[in-house]
Amino acid sequence: MKPPTDRQLDVLRFVSGYINEHRHAPSLREIREGIGVSGSTAVTQHLELLERKRLIGRSPGVTRGLWVTGAGLDAVRAAACA
């Protein structure tokens, strides 16, 4: 499986940091604003790719039903050390 792109890492870092700070997942709008993109479609596409890479998990139909997997946390840590 391909490693996350720089933009995907931005999303992953934002989501991970947000969950650590707020104890719940961010909304799509909060992710969009947090990474500086204008449309929710781009955020949704990044989340879908991160889920396929098993770096995040999502509960369909659940508001804020998003979490970072162990592999996702490892990717965030590895990016911080690079």
Image: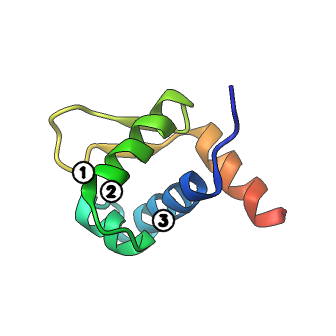
How much space separates mark 2 and mark 3, taking CA atoms? 10 Å
- Give the residue number, with chain letter if any, for mark 2: 25
Quarter holding the C terminus is bottom right
Left or right of 3 in this view: 27: left
Relative to 31, does residue 8 appear above or below in the rendering? above
Q: Amino acid at mark 1?
A: Arg
Percent x, y of residue 24 = 31, 59
Q: Amino acid at mark 2?
A: Ala
- Give the residue number, with chain letter if any, for mark 3: 14
Near mark 1 (Cα within 10 A), the count class, few <14, some 14-19 or many ≥20, is some
> Circle 3 — which element?
helix
Relative to 51, does residue 81 appear above or below in the rendering? below
In terms of image quadrants, where is residue 78? bottom right
- Give the residue number, with chain letter if any, for mark 1: 64
Q: Are marks 1 and 2 in contact (CB under 8 Å)?
A: yes
Left or right of 6 in this view: 20: left
> Circle 2 — which element?
loop
Residue drawn at x 70%, y 39% is: 3
Q: Amino acid at mark 3?
A: Phe
